[in-house]
Amino acid sequence: MSTSKTPSERRTHLVRLAGGLFAEQGFRATTVRQIADAAGILSGSLYHHFDSKESIGDEILSAFLEDVLAGYRAAVAESDDPRAAIERIVRSSTVTLDRHRAALTMLQRDWNYFSGQPRFAYLRTAMKEIEQTWIDLLERGRETGAFRADLDARLTYRLLRDILWLPTSWASSKSWTTDQIVDGLLRLLFDGIKSA
Amino acid sequence: MSTSKTPSERRTHLVRLAGGLFAEQGFRATTVRQIADAAGILSGSLYHHFDSKESIGDEILSAFLEDVLAGYRAAVAESDDPRAAIERIVRSSTVTLDRHRAALTMLQRDWNYFSGQPRFAYLRTAMKEIEQTWIDLLERGRETGAFRADLDARLTYRLLRDILWLPTSWASSKSWTTDQIVDGLLRLLFDGIKSA
DNA sequence: GGGCGCCGACCGAACGCTTGCTTGGTACAC
DNA sequence: GTGTACCAAGCAAGCGTTCGGTCGGCGCCC
């Protein structure tokens, strides 16, 4: 009944383990010894599977961004109007972010650390694409009359992107289901809190 | 013309210096040697003014929470209806948060670190009061018909509190004035992004 | 008014501990 | 009998913190 040892599937298991710790504590705050402990292993043995702590972070982050960008591209490509595209982004993001909680915590808490290193240059690239997608959608929606004419696309984007990434931090509190959060968010986003 | 040396005004200067670094990098990520360097001093000499790095953090955090709570209490006491109170909270918060950028970064990035220690128990207490204030306002507004009947007060609070604390992180980008951000935020909050 | 004592501010050097990472060896697989 | 997965031990660098000592300036005494 012990876990059958697939060839290099064990490596994936280690990444997931590390990811759990990163999601709770952030990347820098997590030590290689903690990761090793969680795996029931000595810290030095980790370096049989990875050549550095950063490599683990790299794997987590790049996988996350691929998923996010794929979601954004699909949402834009397969939606008729900006409002529908935004709703699709929000809904797909929630699923993606839920699967990659570690990556998001890392980006939120250790952005300075990663974004400074050449190795993680792809972070900045991906962020730019995300920003451009939002701004295009917001401006197109404004032009077609779907959104308020006085909407500041850039400002609204900054608010929205961060807002969208927030609820992931609430992981541990099981007060709400993912669906509840998305619905609450979309409602707040489109209609505000005022009664009609 | 050199800075006249007030007795223990130099201490305040050090706190502000440290705060600047905390705001950029977070508390844990900032080393006492960095603080000392910024002050043109050796790291050990810091301990002539403070008995620990945590003490510096304590001073920054407690001052911040006092200001925030004062703002919340005044907003509730001096407003007639929930909607007005919320608008007042948002407007006062923006000013407060701007003055205490370091504290906010510390809470966002190092919450786990601080909230675990008995010394910083007041953090949890203050947060509870903030939460209760929001929930009371949202529920009262729902009862009086000012807000949507299907508004989930607790969920909305979680979104709003975090949203409110977000723009502080954008410090460096001078793309927007504080007023612009508040107005955009309030508009988004009450009315959403849809055109009427 | 010149010397004395003191005190705040800082230096220089170290302490104990934790960090990410390396190295040499071993047990077991196939 | 070669390779994989691990252990045991340890390294250098960096962390927060401590400690003995230096130095300039202020009050004060005679």
Image (cartoon, coloured by chain):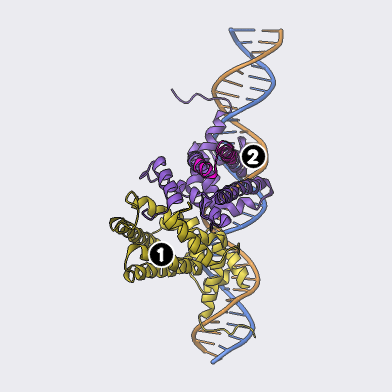
Chain colours: A yellow, B purple, C blue, D orange
Q: In the rendered structure, does residue B178 fall within the stretch colored magenta?
A: no
In this view of the protein, which residue sits in the foreground, B158 or A60? B158
Please provide percent x and percent y for residue B32: 55, 44
Q: Position of residue B78 (x, y in %)?
A: 56, 35
Subunit of label 1: A
Please say whether residue B27 is visible from this viewpoint. no
Nearest-to-viewer mark from 1 and 2: 1
- The quarter of the picture where the N terminus of chain B appears is top left
Specify whether B118 is left or right of A114: right
Closest to the observer: B184 or D1?
B184
Residue A167: x and y in percent read 52, 60
Per the model, the C-alpha gap separating discs 1 and 2 is 52 Å
A159, above or below B93, in the image:
below
A172 sits to left or right of A67: right
Magenta-colored segment: predominant secondary structure: helix
Residue A146 occupies quadrant? bottom left
Q: Which residue is mark 1?
A: A87
Question: Could you tell me which residue is drawn at 54 percent across and 39 percent down?
Answer: B42
The range drawn in magenta is B63-88
| Residue picked out by circle 2 | B51
Q: Quadrant of residue A67?
A: bottom left
Q: Secondary structure at mark 1?
A: helix
Task: Give the amino acid type for the residue marked by disc 1 in the picture.
Answer: Glu
Decide: is A191 above or below A57. Answer: above
Given residues B23 and B133, the one toward you in this image is: B133
Q: Chain of mark 2?
A: B
- Where does residue B135 sit, x and y in percent of width and height? 59, 50
As helix, strand or loop, the secondary structure at mark 2 comes to loop
Query: At label 2, which amino acid type do we have?
Result: Asp
